[in-house]
Image (spheres, rainbow, N blue to C red):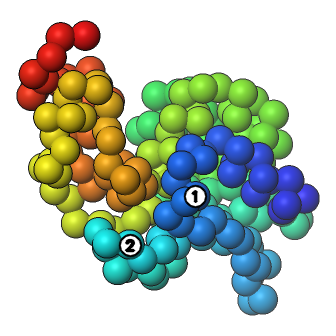
Amino acid sequence: MIEEVFQTIKGSINKQYFGNSKFYYNKSATTGLYSLMVESTPSLYHLDTSAHLFARVKLSGKLQYISFSGTFEKDFAALNIPFTKIASDDFVRIDIEYFLNIALNNSAVHKLLNRIYTSSFSFPSFGCCAKYVECSNAGHCLHTDILYASAACQYKHNLDAGRIFYATTQK
């Protein structure tokens, strides 16, 4: 079943991100939990290749769930996704059946999963790159490493929200 969970979540993530990262899972021999991991591939823009936790999945026993960092608690609450807050490790747990059958049919959940994916990386943020005028004219980010830009470029967040500051042409 982990392969189904993994592939379902992977199908929600922007395919462009996989050109510059690895998404995989492994199972803990001691806890039986699966860890869904992300790892960037080195590029001209970053050298960090360390693995980072995207989510944890428990598929054994009565309580089966997927858990995400508590950082996203308000986001899940805003989407009316029922969860249990685990204060001892700052995670939110969501029933796995509910997550697979209900939550993943929501486009807002797909958007949140993409944000969780890009937030999993620890790239230093930057205001904008040398393509800021070209991006402004296009109305979207043109960076060659879209994962890096999605995680680190502050201007891309503005472009994604429809705030364009530097356009030299009218659309």
Disc 1 marks a residue whose amino acid type is: Phe
Quarter assignment of residue 45? bottom left
> Is the Cβ of the residue at disc 2 closer than 8 Å to that at disc 1?
no
Report the residue that reaches farthest toward the bottom.
Answer: 30
The residue where tag 2 is placed is 43
Task: Report the front residue among 163 and 3.
Answer: 163
Task: Report the front residue among 101 and 50.
Answer: 50
**SS type, badge 2:** loop
**SS type, badge 1:** helix
Report the residue that reaches farthest toward the top.
Answer: 171
Look at the image and tell me in which quarter the C terminus lies: top left
Q: CA distance from mark 2 to mark 1?
A: 13 Å
Look at the image and tell me in which quarter the N terminus lies: bottom right
**Residue in view at x 50 percent, y 39 percent:** 112
Left or right, 128 with reference to 139: left
Disc 2 marks a residue whose amino acid type is: Ser
Q: Is residue 18 visible?
A: yes
Q: Nearer the N terminus, badge 2 or badge 1?
A: 1
Left or right, 170 with reference to 27: left
x and y, in percent, of residue 43 in the image: 38, 72
Left or right, 146 with reference to 165: right
Above/below status of 94 relative to 25: above
The residue where tag 1 is placed is 18
**Residue in view at x 29 percent, y 26 percent:** 138
x and y, in percent, of residue 30 in the image: 75, 89
